[in-house]
Image (cartoon, rainbow, N blue to C red):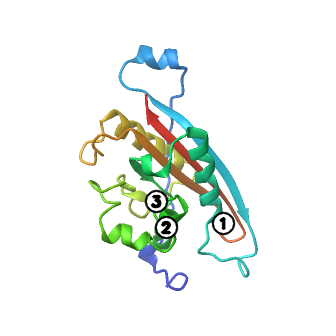
Amino acid sequence: MIAEPLTLLQCCRKGSGAAAVLVGSERWCRRRGGPSVWIEGAGLRAQTGDANVRDLTDFGATRAAAKAAHEAAGIGPDEVDLVELHDAFTIGELLHYEGLGLCPEGEGGRLVRDGDVALGGRVPVNVSRGLLCKSHPVGATGVAQFAEFTWQLRGAAEGRQVEGARVALAHSQGGTGLEALATCVTILVRG
């Protein structure tokens, strides 16, 4: 038992790793050929509070960052084709489904049961296998999401391709999670 009710296998391991993203002007991207991937909108929010008082099942920063990203992009939650979210702990994934607007509060488990978040489902989540499978190379995790989306939105994610994907949502968090937490939600689109 790590922290009631989470066991060792329900908590991701920290790992080492690196990631990089090439960022270029529209002109540069067009010269390179192939489909481009654009950041259409982003939201960043912080959440603080005493862990002894705050409801630890409420990720208000996720909800606020998602709302800001959707507004900036002009794209609603129902238009998202795939999601990569911060699943460092099993319970977090279900709570983030709700915070990201993929389902109403309390319905995260239903998304899993109905297959909505599986590859081939309504909105596949963590087709890269997520942090629980890959581990968590702190600092590189968010960039790895962008790499996954570049492959997905270009149609090059062999073996895990989300067919017809045009809009992707990346959700990443940092901080202790108890007293301080920062959340970033980014919406990427195929150019």
Classify 164 as above or below 176: above
Identity of the residue drawn at 28% across and 48% down: 160
Mark 2: give few (<14), some (14-19) or many (20+) Cα within 10 Å.
Answer: few
Q: CA distance from mark 1 to mark 2?
A: 26 Å
| Residue 36 visible here | yes
According to the picture, the residue beneath numbered tag 3 turns out to be 102
Q: How many marks?
A: 3
In which quadrant is the C terminus drawn?
A: top left
Residue drawn at 24 percent across, 47 percent down: 159
Residue linked to disc 1: 176
Please state if 5 lies on the left or on the right of 32 as rendered. Answer: right
Label 3: how many Cα within 10 Å (few below 14, some 14–19, many 20+): many
Residue 131 at what x, y percent from top left?
A: 45, 60
Residue 102 lies, in percent from the top left, at 46, 59
Q: Report whether 77 appears left or right of 177.
A: left
Q: Earlier in the sequence, mark 3 or mark 1?
A: 3
Image-quadrant location for residue 48: bottom right
Relative height, residue 149 to residue 117 (above, below): above
Furthest residue in direction left, as rendered: 159
Amino acid type of the residue tagged 1 in the rendering: Thr
Name which of mark 1 and mark 2 comes first in the sequence.
Answer: 2
Residue 174 visible to the viewer: no
Q: Which residue is mark 2?
A: 104
Task: Determine the secondary structure under disc 2.
Answer: loop
Residue type at mark 2: give it.
Pro
| 3D distance between C-alphas at marks 3 and 2 | 7 Å
**Closer to us: 136 or 121:** 121
Callout 3: SS: loop
Task: Tell me residue 91's x, y (percent).
Answer: 48, 73
| Amino acid type assigned to the residue bearing label 3 in the image | Leu
